[in-house]
Image (cartoon, grey):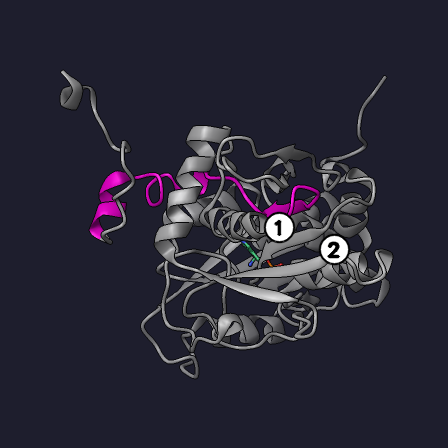
Amino acid sequence: MDYYESVVDLIGGTPLVRLNKVTEGIEALVLAKVEYVNPGGSVKDRIAVRMIEDAEKAGLLQPGGTIVEPTSGNTGVGLAIVAQQRGYKCVFVCPDKVSEDKQNVLRAYGAEVVVCPTAVDPADPRSYYQVSDRLVREIPGAWKPDQYSNPANPRSHYETTGPELWEQTDGKITHFVAGVGTGGTISGIGKYLKEVSGGKVKIIGADPEGSVYSGGTGRPYLVEGVGEDFWPTTYDTGICDEIVAVSDKDSFDLTRRLAREEGLLVGGSCGMAAEAALRVAREAGPDAVVVVLLPDGGRGYLSKIFNDEWLARYGFLTTAGEGTTIADVL
Ligand code: PMP
């Protein structure tokens, strides 16, 4: 018989797939690390396991304990799955701008979701920062993973994703590209690849235009899960050889092309990272092996990036041939 002991054992070991169409005119080999095949649907399952295991070892999380984290997205799903399997409760605190669908995904896994008003000052007792801090203080046995400062976040990538990439490419990887949010992915993988290759692999961070990593002030952008308006400690500021800033429009254009041309239905931060990877690959020679990490799937973005009206509202729907209906052709 061939089976896994639990869903948690399905985390990691994700495949690499070649990008064939969007790479037209590019000589380098461009490979995508497809993280949406993790059981929770994103790369964040990896950090959830390691953060929980570390907390158990340190005695911060005891049987029957409660995980409290201000998150609405992928990290919450990863934590919810691992917590459920290990017998912990989960309380996620999120601002009310987060869609019902996202809240319901977390509830579906058995987590409790506390919704806070977006339009209040971070210092206001009703803000989601204040509420999550209060819940940690008040719930007995509560523990807050804090993915923005938890060293298990980058370490999970140093120990799993980095070695996977090196093995899968047989040590031939020359460039690694990933979006930067907490910075855990790029810092952990970057450290491993630099060490194992003797500094040869180039590490390229992709960042939404306006975010601090590419010199911005944190000005709003629409791509989700990447870019920041502060510098988290999980980001190693010395790790990137280059940071590529990508606009929302370029990110969403390529996100849609990845679905239509490569059969990869992925999120907006994937389009952003892939756009940066294509720019790098265009400059690289035929022997280059450029790997881009695609953090999550596209189903959570159907009413946004894959919705023509939503795109048109922001003036982004300009890609020729897209949005054509049968009526236009007849
Ligand atoms: N893309 C998505 C969709 C994410 O949720 C995240 C995590 N915030 C990232 C990219 C960036 O990963 P990291 O936090 O490891 O920098």
Residue matched to label 2: 157
Query: In the rendered view, would you say 20 is above or below 113?
Result: above
Observer-nearest of 317 and 219? 317
Q: Is residue 17 above or below residue 220?
A: above
Q: Residue 317, image x and y in percent?
A: 26, 44
Q: Name which residue lies at 66% across and 67% down.
A: 241
Where is residue 202 drawn, in percent x and y? Answer: 70, 59
Assess disc 1: are there few (<14), some (14-19) or many (≥20) residues with their C-alpha within 10 Å of its C-alpha.
some
Q: Amino acid at mark 1?
A: Ala
Q: Quadrant of the C terminus?
A: top left
- The amino acid type, in three-letter code, at marker 2 is His
Q: CA distance from mark 1 to mark 2?
A: 25 Å
Question: Residue at coordinates 74% horizontally, 41% vertically from top-left?
Answer: 8
Q: Which mark is residue 164?
A: none
The answer to whether residue 214 is seen in the rendering is yes
Range drawn in magenta: 284-313
The tag on residue 284 is: 1
Say if 190 sits above or below 262 in the image. below
Q: Is mark 2 within 8 Å of ligand 1?
A: yes
